[in-house]
């Protein structure tokens, strides 16, 4: 086995090590709460302090990956000389990489890391210093993030399943972390039950794929296996569909969304934020990689996974937005809203699959030229970057605006002991900064300029419409449905804004935000409003990232 | 890593290696900009009530500018042509291309950076004393920082758009600072006047800029695609039988006329003296008003590309006329700052005239020396005002004894302004201008010499009235100013003498470094125009300049120091002339009677038209009809359209309500529903699969 350029996934390794440090020091500190180590080096500060270098490291990994992706290496595995991309890791016989740390994966890693850093700051404000088991809490969050990072790079069914499972297991525990809260326990249990069912179905699908393609787990090998007539049977379809169930559960895509509202409402708010962004980013990266690397040769013209995704995309948008309207609890409302948001992101995914000219992309990877072990400048694969750019920009925008919204919700929830939307009435008088910030995040979620959400939606819908011209009217339909849904969503988002600004406050005291809360809201505000100012460079960078997208 | 590769690429493009200082020159305007924000937000709580933030920033910029000057003028001396360092980054996409922005460093920028930072830092230090106790003290320093930032950005901009933005920003800060004491109606009026009058010129600048952009397709000044490389595209005959490039030059010159207070747009500058005196020193004497000269100098290739020479002739004659015209007015004023203001206008006229007669280096040289001695004069005047509490020179007198430091520095700068040869900075630069004019245009030369005579007269009149003789108003108890105000005076006084030695005719470091700024093509044009002019010392010119100064001092001494000549006797014969000059040739009154009255009349007519025809007849009539129609529509809207809208809203809500019952809260139901969905999907897939039996996967492969 060829290990490859291990430093490309070093952020994840660093995070695992940091999580262990947090766990060990935190457990020692917890023996004497408020004194000694817990006083000198409180876990709730140690964890973000260790997380921040990870974010910087992940950023570096993106840049490094952008350069590395330009090269291939010829390596001797067994008795065979194979040429693999320089970003391939753990390459097994036949040139199949188990992890592919391409810029796309590295960018999702960065999103996961930055999101987790923000979630940690929210936790700092949400839990008090005497929170029990904080070592376990923070180290679980960090393990989950490392798993998300590996999932974003995984290009092998086993790697995918293991990383997603690690992410899920950590999430189950985190969802029921507040043991004193009945709802939290309920959330964790429901999440676990539902997740276990979906995971089992997904694993079953993977095993079917393993079987029909001749015993391969690597996505690239599956792609090759699926092109043989022997593999073409009803079983392959069922395998693909079942595998998609496992990913759909992570994304909370309709009809696998049932867990989301209950879990979002019951889980501690920082964990809700984590699930809605980091966990989803990982699921999205895995889905995109699975679709584009393993099954893209099943032509989308026929009734296939492509049409299923189109229907589920439209369904997610409509279901999320319609059911969000009657909600009275803001966390539940945001849960439905994030179901709808994943629908918008899925438009980017379904239009992205058209960007892959099948054969041409396979050719460079199938080269097995005998050569000495050298680094070679790889042939560059450029294709129309619109759609994937939209996806990449939107996930970044979504991270900022959704985490910002949850940060405000968490901050207000701890101070007013309520998540009811009605209690947001007159928030403008009680905390002008938080009210203004929440307004920005909500209009960004609704996709109103001049916010990041607008940029992302513009690029995603634009990409869909661009591709629709080439015999794919369904993409134009999806874009139109996305726009209609944006209008529907404005109703419940702006309802909160209306309450905050125009409803009377009923003489309640003003809220004092902590430094951590203000900082995290400010970070998200800068991201949400700054993305449109820097739209040009961001789009350039995103197209750089997706042009180096390897399968 | 990506960023590193980009940097490397920038460096390779320029061939010559530049120091880190040059590459980071964009920090120079940025620091005062940051100080502006900080002072504005936290000024009252900041160190020194915000003054130290502003001063710290400008001093840091000063240090960087000095480092740049060392690199470009002293260390670069051996390499002779350091050429140009420029960095562009895409700014906004336009059509198929993009507008770039960035900065460029060349000798001209470095000179301007140095002048602006030196004067600005000294003036800000001086302001600590002068503005002490002002209620809006932090805001004053914030504005100063904004000004410094905009001015510095103007001189390092490498494209016209950024130049124009900075140009307007300095105009804005000028407006804010003139009207700084906005409780005084006169200050408010003066600020408004300055803003509006300069705006008249700015229209020309904008039009010239757009003309250049349309024809060359770029706002960038430098580079293959830039304006200067593509000026031949403007070499076609345009309106008035002039080549387009001359039109562009004239339009740009309009901007310069406004900003540099040249005739006929000079009227705003004397009124601008309503601002605090340090502001007058920095903005309305040393730096901002010189921006017009800088603009013409920066865009000099445009003027050189004009083979007909029309634009430069206009520059020369407007400048020469202004130099004389303002000098005569200066003779008859009694407000110490106004005299200096007219002197500024006159000296800016010199610079313009110099540019007009191909004295490119001389003009920039005079700009630099003038900045130092004129700033010193204004700060000295400020010191006098601070010490006596009045601006009227008829109430002063004999201040020499009470304010020795102020007196001596003021005298040194006066000599420099008069252009006393060999010993003062102003001498070297003014003689350089006269030498070029002697060679190319004798009319301008004559105006220059006569102007020098007048300058000496009015300046020595000022000095004698203020510092010599006996105190005329016994109510005033003059006192010397605090040390924080005197230190800048001394430093500037030193510069008013020493700054000239970089440009002596024998070892002209200044010219040597500045000329390559024009680039090879235009340098050749300029040298061709100045063909035959000897380098070095021109004894005739020096003699005439010296004579003018000597006659001026003698006349002034005889009239105002020892009243041997009694000018009162001329009253019956030349009284009308004195009145004419004292009233500034009635220019303001003429504008009032013509332009402003015409404008007001037009406004009145427009107002009446608006009121009676538009509002009454059309709008109200239409409004009446509309109301009728709208009542009909209203009914339709309420019943049919709203009904539909409500139906959609109601349906949406009802759907949402219906769908939420799927979410029962029971985990078993969830799994059951999911399995149902999965079965439906799988059935759909399988049905689809067997309907498409004829399909062969390999067909998709070769699609």
Image (spheres, coloured by chain):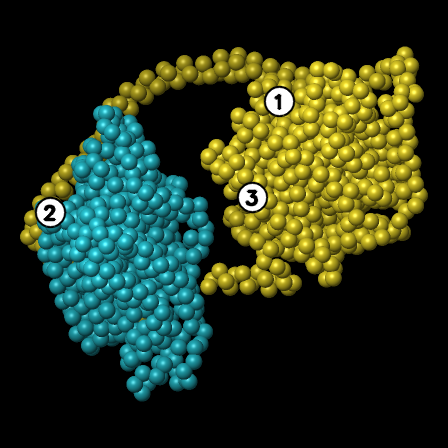
Q: Position of residue A507 (x, y in %)?
A: 23, 25
| Residue underneath mark 1 | B187
The label nearer to you, 3 versus 2, is: 3
Pick whichever, B16 or B220, lies toward us: B16
Q: Residue B13 occupies which quadrant of the picture?
A: bottom right
Label 1 Cα neighbours within 10 Å, binned few <14 / some 14-19 / many ≥20: many
Give the mark nearer the N terminus: 3 vs 1: 3
| Residue underneath mark 3 | B57
Does dot 1 land on a helix, a strand or a loop?
Answer: helix
Q: Is residue B170 visible?
A: no
Q: Are marks 2 and 1 in contact (CB under 8 Å)?
A: no
Apparent side of residue A237 relative to residue B452 in the rendered image (left or right): left
Does dot 3 land on a helix, a strand or a loop?
Answer: helix
The tag on residue B416 is none
Give the Cα separation between the discs numbered 2 and 1.
Answer: 69 Å
Q: Position of residue B183 (x, y in %)?
A: 57, 19
- Chain A's shade in the image? cyan
Residue at screen point 81% across, 16% down: B579
Q: Position of residue A259 (x, y in %)?
A: 14, 51
Q: Are marks 3 and 1 in contact (CB under 8 Å)?
A: no
The tag on residue A180 is 2
> Which chain is home to disc 2?
A
Q: Residue furthest front?
A: B401
Residue at screen point 89% across, 49% down: B537
**Chain letter for the yellow part:** B
Q: Residue B552 occupies which quadrant of the picture?
A: top right
Q: Position of residue B410 (x, y in %)?
A: 76, 33
Give the Cα separation between the discs numbered 3 and 1.
Answer: 28 Å
The label nearer to you, 3 versus 1, is: 3
Does dot 2 land on a helix, a strand or a loop?
Answer: loop
């Amino acid at each position: 086995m060829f290990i490859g350029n291990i430093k490309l996934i070093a952020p994840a390794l660093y995070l695992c090590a940091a999580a262990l440090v947090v766990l060990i020091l935190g457990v020692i500190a917890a023996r004497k709460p408020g004194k000694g180590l817990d006083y000198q080096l409180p876990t709730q500060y140690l964890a973000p302090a260790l997380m921040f270098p990870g974010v910087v490291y992940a950023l570096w990994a993106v840049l490094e990956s952008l350069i590395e992706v330009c090269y291939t290496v010829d390596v001797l595995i067994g008795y065979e000389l194979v040429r693999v991309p320089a970003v391939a890791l753990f390459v097994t016989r036949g040139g199949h990489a188990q992890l592919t740390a391409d810029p796309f994966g590295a960018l999702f890693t960065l999103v996961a890391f930055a999101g987790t850093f923000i979630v940690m700051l929210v936790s700092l404000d949400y839990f008090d210093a005497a929170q029990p088991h904080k070592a376990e809490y923070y180290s679980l969050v960090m393990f989950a993030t490392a798993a998300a990072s590996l999932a974003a790079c995984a290009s092998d069914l086993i790697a995918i399943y293991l990383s997603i499972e690690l992410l899920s297991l950590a999430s189950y525990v985190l969802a029921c972390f507040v043991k004193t809260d009945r709802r939290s326990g309920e959330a964790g249990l429901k999440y676990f039950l539902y997740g276990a069912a979906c995971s089992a179905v997904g694993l079953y699908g993977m095993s079917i794929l393993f079987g029909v393609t001749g015993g391969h787990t690597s996505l690239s090998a599956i792609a090759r296996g699926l092109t043989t007539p022997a593999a073409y049977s009803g079983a392959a379809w069922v395998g693909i569909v079942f595998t998609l169930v496992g990913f759909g559960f992570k994304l909370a895509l309709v009809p696998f969304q049932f867990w989301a509202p209950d879990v979002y409402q019951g889980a501690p708010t920082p964990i809700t934020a984590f699930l809605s962004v980091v966990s989803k980013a990982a699921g999205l990266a895995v889905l995109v990689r699975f679709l584009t690397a393993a099954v893209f040769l099943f032509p989308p013209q026929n009734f296939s996974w492509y049409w299923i995704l189109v229907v589920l995309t439209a369904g997610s948008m409509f279901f999320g937005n319609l059911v969000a309207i009657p909600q009275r609890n803001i966390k539940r409302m945001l849960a439905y809203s994030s179901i709808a948001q994943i629908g918008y992101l899925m438009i980017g995914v379904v239009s992205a699959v058209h960007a892959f000219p099948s054969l041409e992309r396979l050719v460079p990877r199938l080269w097995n030229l005998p050569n000495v072990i050298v680094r070679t400048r790889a042939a560059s694969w450029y294709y129309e970057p619109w759609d994937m750019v939209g996806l990449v920009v939107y996930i970044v925008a979504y991270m900022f605006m959704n985490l910002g919204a949850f940060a405000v919700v968490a901050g207000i929830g701890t101070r007013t002991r309520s998540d009811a939307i009605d209690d947001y009435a007159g928030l403008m008088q009680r905390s002008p900064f938080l009210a203004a910030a929440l307004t920005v995040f909500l209009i960004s979620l609704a996709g109103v300029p001049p916010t990041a959400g607008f940029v992302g939606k513009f690029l995603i819908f634009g990409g869909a419409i661009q591709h629709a011209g080439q015999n794919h009217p369904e993409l134009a339909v999806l874009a139109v449905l996305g726009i209609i849904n944006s209008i529907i969503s404005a109703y419940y988002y702006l309802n909160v804004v209306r309450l905050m600004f125009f409803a009377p406050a009923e003489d309640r005291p003003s809220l004092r935000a902590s430094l951590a809360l203000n900082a995290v809201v400010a970070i998200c505000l800068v991201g949400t409003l700054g993305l449109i100012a820097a739209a040009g460079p961001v789009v350039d960078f995103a197209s750089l990232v997706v042009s180096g997208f390897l399968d | 890593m990506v960023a590193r590769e980009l940097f490397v690429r920038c460096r390779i493009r320029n061939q010559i290696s530049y120091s880190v200082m040059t590459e980071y020159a964009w920090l120079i305007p940025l620091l005062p900009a940051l100080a502006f924000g900080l002072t504005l937000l936290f000024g009252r709580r900041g160190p020194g009530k915000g003054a130290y933030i502003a001063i710290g920033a400008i001093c840091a910029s000063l240090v960087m500018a000095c480092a740049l000057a060392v690199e470009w003028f002293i260390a670069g001396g051996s390499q002779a042509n350091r050429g140009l360092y420029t960095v562009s980054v895409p700014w906004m996409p336009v059509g198929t291309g993009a507008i770039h922005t960035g900065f460029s460093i060349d000798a001209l920028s470095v000179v301007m950076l140095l002048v602006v930072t030196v004067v600005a830092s000294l003036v800000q230090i001086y302001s600590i004393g002068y503005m002490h106790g002002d209620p809006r003290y932090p805001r004053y320093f914030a504005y100063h920082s904004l000004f410094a930032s905009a001015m510095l950005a103007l001189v390092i901009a490498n494209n016209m758009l950024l130049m124009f933005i900075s140009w307007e920003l300095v105009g804005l800060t000028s407006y804010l600072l003139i009207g700084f004491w906005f409780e005084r109606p006169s200050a408010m009026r003066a600020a408004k006047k300055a803003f509006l009058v300069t705006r008249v010129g700015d229209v020309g600048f904008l039009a010239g800029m757009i003309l250049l952009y349309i024809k060359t397709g770029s706002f960038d000044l430098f580079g293959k695609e830039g304006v200067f490389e593509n000026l031949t595209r403007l070499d076609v005959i345009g309106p008035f039988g002039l080549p387009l490039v001359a039109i562009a030059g004239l339009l740009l010159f309009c901007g310069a006329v406004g900003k540099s207070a040249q005739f006929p747009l000079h009227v705003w500058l004397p009124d601008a003296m309503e601002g605090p005196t340090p502001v007058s020193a920095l903005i309305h004497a040393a730096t901002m008003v010189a921006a017009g000269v800088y603009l013409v100098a920066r865009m000099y290739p445009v003027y050189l590309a004009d083979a007909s020479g029309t634009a430069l002739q206009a520059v020369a004659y407007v400048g020469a006329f202004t130099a004389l015209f303002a000098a005569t007015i200066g003779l008859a004023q009694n407000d110490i700052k106004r005299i200096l203001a007219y002197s500024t206008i006159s000296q800016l006229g010199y610079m313009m005239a110099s540019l007009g007669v191909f004295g490119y280096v001389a003009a920039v040289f005079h700009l630099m020396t003038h900045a130092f001695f004129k700033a010193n004069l204004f700060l000295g005047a400020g010191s006098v005002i601070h010490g006596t509490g009045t601006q009227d020179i008829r109430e002063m007198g004999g201040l020499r004894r009470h304010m020795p430091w102020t007196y001596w520095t003021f005298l040194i700068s006066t000599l420099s302004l008069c252009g006393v040869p060999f010993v003062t900075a102003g001498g070297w630069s003014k003689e350089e201008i006269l030498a070029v004019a002697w060679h190319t245009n004798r009319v301008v030369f004559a105006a220059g010499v006569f102007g020098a005579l007048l300058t000496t007269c009015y300046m020595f009149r000022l000095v004698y009235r203020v510092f010599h003789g006996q105190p005329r108003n016994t109510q005033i108890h003059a006192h010397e100013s605090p040390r924080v105000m005197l230190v800048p005076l001394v430093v500037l006084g030193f510069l008013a003498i020493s700054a000239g030695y970089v440009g002596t005719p024998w070892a002209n470091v200044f010219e040597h470094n500045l000329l390559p700024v024009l680039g090879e093509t235009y340098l050749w044009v300029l040298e061709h125009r100045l063909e035959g002019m000897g380098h070095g010392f021109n004894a005739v010119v020096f003699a005439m300049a010296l004579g003018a100064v000597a006659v001026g001092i003698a006349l002034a001494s005889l009239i105002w120091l020892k009243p041997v000549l009694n000018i009162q006797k001329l009253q019956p014969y030349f009284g009308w002339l004195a009145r004419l000059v004292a009233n500034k040739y009635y220019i303001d009154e003429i504008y009032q009677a013509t332009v402003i009255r015409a404008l007001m009349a037009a406004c009145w007519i427009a107002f009446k038209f608006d009121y009676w025809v538009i509002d009454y007849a059309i709008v109200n009539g239409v409004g009446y009809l509309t109301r009728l129609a709208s009542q009909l529509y209203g009914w339709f809207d309420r019943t049919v359209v709203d009904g539909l809208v409500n139906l959609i809203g109601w349906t949406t809500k009802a759907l949402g309500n219906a769908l939420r019952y799927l979410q029962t809260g029971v985990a078993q139901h969830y799994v059951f529903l999911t399995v149902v969905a999965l079965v439906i999907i799988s059935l759909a897939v399988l049905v689809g699969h067997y309907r498409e039996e004829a399909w062969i996967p390999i067909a998709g492969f070769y699609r």
